[in-house]
Image (cartoon, grey):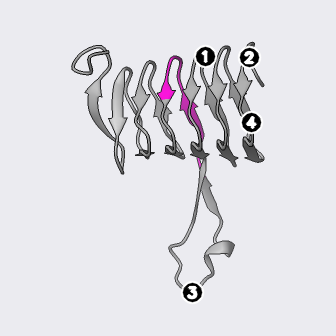
Amino acid sequence: MLGDGVVFGPQVSIRGRGLLKIGNGSSVNSGVIFGMTDSITIGESVLIADNVSFRTADHEFADRNMPIVTQGERSLPIVVNDDVWIGANVVILRGVTVGRGSVIAANAVVREDIPDFAIVGGVPGRIIGWRGKDSGA
């Protein structure tokens, strides 16, 4: 489901069996991957830079006596709220909710929820500032 005015760059990949919903006025740049075994919901006015990867599942691997490929997977939805900017090469993992108005710096790996208006960077992603406070924004 796509809202009004959604813009896609070239070579966007939508893979899997989950539901993708993108809100009004959002943009998805080139090379973005939506890897879905569960749903991905993108809010309104969200900016997604090049080569961002959304991954709603992880492989099970606890049993050393069984090939990983046969152990199944764990999946949870991803939610990105309104007015978010996701920098280039970011990876957002299963079960994450990205708070409204937040910014994710390039190359971050996000594995935990992000509060509203947080600025997150690093591997793993951590809060490095707050939009409108110490960020100068």
Asked if disc 2 and disc 1 are in contact, CB closer than 8 Å, the reply is: yes
Q: Position of residue 8 (x, y in %)?
A: 72, 29
Asked if disc 4 and disc 2 are in contact, CB closer than 8 Å, the reply is: no
Residue under numbered circle 3: 65
Of 127 and 57, the residue lying toward us: 127
Residue neighbourhood size for the residue with mark 4, other residues' Cα within 10 Å, grouped as few (<14), some (14–19), many (≥20): some
Residue neighbourhood size for the residue with mark 3, other residues' Cα within 10 Å, grouped as few (<14), some (14–19), many (≥20): few
Q: Is residue 72 magenta?
A: no
Q: At numbered mark 1, what does the secondary structure look like: helix, strand or loop?
A: loop
How far is the residue under mark 3 from the one under mark 2? Answer: 46 Å
Identify the magenta region.
75-85
How far is the residue under mark 2 from the one under mark 1? Answer: 8 Å
* Displayed quadrant of residue 77: top right
Q: Position of residue 18 (x, y in %)?
A: 73, 42
Of 68 and 48, the residue lying toward us: 48
Residue under numbered circle 2: 3
The reply, left or right, for residue 135 in relation to residue 81 is left
Q: Quadrant of the C terminus?
A: top left
The residue type indicated by label 2 comes to Gly
Residue under numbered circle 4: 19
In the rendered image, the vertical position of residue 42 relative to residue 65, given as above or below: above
Q: Earlier in the sequence, mark 3 or mark 2?
A: 2
The residue type indicated by label 3 comes to Asn
* Displayed quadrant of residue 65: bottom right
How far is the residue under mark 3 from the one under mark 4? Answer: 34 Å
Q: Earlier in the sequence, mark 2 or mark 1?
A: 2
Residue occupying the point 41% across, 44% down? 108
